Image (cartoon, helix red, strand yellow):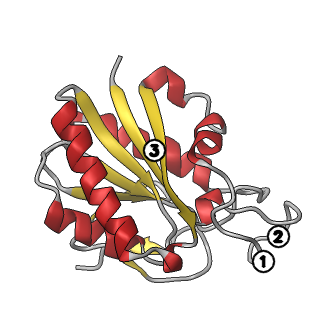
């Protein structure tokens, strides 16, 4: 069975609100990566996924030390395990494209590194995180994703790090790759 590494950093995908009808008033980064993985049991049928918590914050609160840690952890994981299929990073959307671009410049392994987030907290009736995470894992396991650098998977779309941008702060279709 394929192996993946899931690095969790927090964000809306790991956010919680007081009730399921609340989409905007929530706290980002409350759930850990293990909880995100457990919310999508189908992932266990796709790969053996190891989870590591790098941070658990709103992505606007990520520090240079977090980014340095992500780069080091990805490099170490790829160097230590030639059979590792890829890496998935759960991330807040405020700085997701900046992190993707930084990793694009710093990681030179052809294996997929896929960043994924959500526009609605995990506790929302219509949370988009679980489906986004499932699709991110599917992309990370795809041989077609090899050699394409850092990828962002959101709302059923795959974006390259050098083109992706956040165009909206509301709604699940917030990311696009203009041009």
Residue lying farthest right? 19
The residue depicted at 60 percent of the width and 40 percent of the height is 34
The CA distance from mark 2 to mark 3 is 24 Å
Q: Measured from the top left, where is residue 131 in percent x and y?
A: 57, 47
The crowd level at tag 3 (other Cα within 10 Å; few <14, some 14-19, many 20+) is many
Earlier along the polypeptide chain: callout 1 or callout 3? 1
Q: Secondary structure at mark 1?
A: loop
Earlier along the polypeptide chain: callout 2 or callout 3? 2
The crowd level at tag 1 (other Cα within 10 Å; few <14, some 14-19, many 20+) is few
Q: Measured from the top left, where is residue 63 in percent x and y?
A: 42, 76
The residue indicated by pointer 1 is 25
Disc 2 + disc 1, Cβ < 8 Å: yes
The CA distance from mark 2 to mark 1 is 6 Å
Q: Secondary structure at mark 2?
A: loop
Residue lying farthest top? 1
- Residue 15 numbered tag: none
The residue indicated by pointer 3 is 135
The residue indicated by pointer 2 is 22
Task: Look at discs 1 and 3 and give the one toward the viewer.
Answer: 1
The CA distance from mark 1 to mark 3 is 26 Å
Q: Is residue 154 above or below residue 76?
A: below
The residue depicted at 41 percent of the width and 53 percent of the height is 89
Q: Nearer the viewer, residue 137 or 88?
A: 88
């Amino acid at each position: 069975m394929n192996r993946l590494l899931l690095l969790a950093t927090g964000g809306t995908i790991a956010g919680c609100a007081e009730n399921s009808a609340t989409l905007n008033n929530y706290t980002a980064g409350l759930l850990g990566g293990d909880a995100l993985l457990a919310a999508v049991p189908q992932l266990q049928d796709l790969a053996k996924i190891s989870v590591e918590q790098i941070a658990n914050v709103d992505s606007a609160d990520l520090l240079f030390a977090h980014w340095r840690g992500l780069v080091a952890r990805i490099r170490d994981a790829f160097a230590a395990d030639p059979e590792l299929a890829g890496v998935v990073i759960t991330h807040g959307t405020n700085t997701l494209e900046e992190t993707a671009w930084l990793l694009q410049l710093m990681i030179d392994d052809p294996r997929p590194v896929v960043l994924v987030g959500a526009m609605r907290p995990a506790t929302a009736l219509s949370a988009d995180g679980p489906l986004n995470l499932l699709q991110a894992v599917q992309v990370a396991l795809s041989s077609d994703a090899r050699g394409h650098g850092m990828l962002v998977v959101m709302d059923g779309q795959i974006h390259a790090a050098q083109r992706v941008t956040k165009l909206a702060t509301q709604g699940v279709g917030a990311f696009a790759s203009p041009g």
